[in-house]
Amino acid sequence: MKLGHNWNMDSAPHDTLIQFREVSYTPPGGVAPILETLSIEIQQGATLALLGESGSGKTTTLRLINSLLLPTRGEVMVDGKSTQAWNAMQLRRKVGYVIQEGGLFPHLTASQNVLLMARHLARPADAMQRRLEELCDLTHFPPDALNRYPSELSGGQRQRVGLMRALMLDPDILLLDEPLAALDPMVRASLQTDLKEIFQRLHKTVVLVTHDMAEAGYLADRIVLLRNGKMVQQGTLEELREQPADPFVSAFISAQRSLVQL
């Protein structure tokens, strides 16, 4: 089955789809920056994992990509254009965003949550229905649960609905902010497997936030480890394990017991 209906208005001709150029961010009225002089490039179709302790700037980095935040200094480039030059709504239609528990509206059914933006944009009903069926198949979500409300779904099902909603408009970029953190280990492992398959099938550019180094190594092509708003090291899991650039890298990895098995 071929996925997608080419609902994107903007294609992505650049090899580097996302670029941070010496980006810093200090919240309004804040004294200390949450993010400092971050420079990274994310290639089209690649999966990047952002790791670090709480407060290290991971979620801020995500929110700078879809212009929910604007940099205090430096530039964030998406598809060759600064986020400050983009029309915010056009940019966000290029970006799917998934958060913990899916961020679903509790008063809407699963299908209503998934179709919310497509209906707002007056997409054809038959196209929306086909897309919904495709996404159920892709995410292994049971179609007979589409009429249930979030409170009637399991944690794993809520995350699958959140993922379907993020993919509904066939975005170029997919942002995931610790989407599996609240799940029990068995459900989390199942969703990790499904996410890896989805990334491989769709060839989206993915930026994933997680605390789990093993999860990052499994899902991502490259890892960026942040500490106190600064990048400590970037590379593959093997590079971070075998060639740590800072004692913090070794300490962070040592704290992840599951890496013993990798």
Image (tube, rainbow, N blue to C red):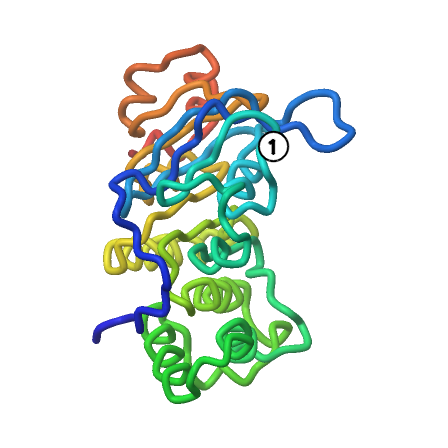
Vertically, is 126 above or below 223?
below
Vertically, is 252 above or below 88?
above
Q: Nearer the viewer, residue 157 or 259?
A: 157
Q: Nearer the viewer, residue 81 or 114?
A: 81
Residue type of the residue flagged with mark 1? Ser
Q: How far across and down, in percent of the image, does residue 42 sit? A: 34, 37
Q: Which secondary structure, mark 1?
A: loop
| Most distant residue in the left direction | 1
Q: How far across and down, in percent of the image, does residue 96 sit? A: 46, 57
What residue is shown with label 1? 54
| Most distant residue in the bottom direction | 126
Image quarter for residue 14? top left
Image quarter for residue 247? top left
Q: How far across and down, in percent of the image, does residue 59 sit? A: 56, 40
Q: Nearer the viewer, residue 157 or 111?
A: 111
Q: Residue at x 45, y 37 (%)?
A: 212
Q: Residue at x 32, y 21 (%)?
A: 241
Horizontal relation, residue 158 to residue 43: left or right: right
Mark 1 closeness class: few <14, some 14–19, many ≥20 residues within 10 Å = few
